Amino acid sequence: MDIADKAAQAEELFFNLALKKQQITPQFSEIFCIDCEEEIPEARRTAIQGVTRCITCQEIYEKKRKAYK
């Protein structure tokens, strides 16, 4: 096994770990938003499994993530 094979193997390992991490979703929704601490409406908590933010904070979070990409 040469260095290129080892690098490819390491890349695959890190890729699979990152993929697993992205797929982990909390089973229960938060009752209060983790950013503003306001109550998350029950309809949102029921509709989206593992929700952690209210709609407003989620929109802000997504805009910030896009800005960093």
Image (tube, rainbow, N blue to C red):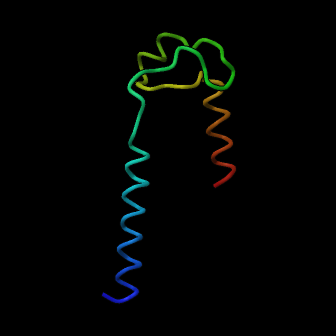
* Relative image position of residue 40 (x, y in whole percent): 56, 14
Name above or below for residue 66 compared with residue 5.
above
Residue at image coords 61%, 39%: 62
Q: Quadrant of residue 26?
A: top left
Residue 32, placed above or below residue 5: above
Residue found at the very far bottom of the displayed protein = 2
Where residue 41 sits: x, y (%)? Answer: 54, 11
Instruction: Between residue 17 and residue 47, name the one nearer to us.
Output: 17
Left or right, residue 40 beside residue 20: right
Question: What residue is at 64 percent from the left and 36 percent from the top?
Answer: 61
Query: In the rendered image of this protein, does residue 20 appear above or below residue 54?
Result: below
Farthest residue toward the left?
1
Labels in figure, total? 0
Image quadrant in which the C terminus is located: bottom right
Q: Residue at x 68, y 52 (%)?
A: 68
Q: Residue at x 37, y 80 (%)?
A: 6
Is residue 63 or residue 3 the one in the foreground? 3
Q: Nearer the viewer, residue 41 or 25?
A: 25
| Quadrant in the picture for the N terminus | bottom left
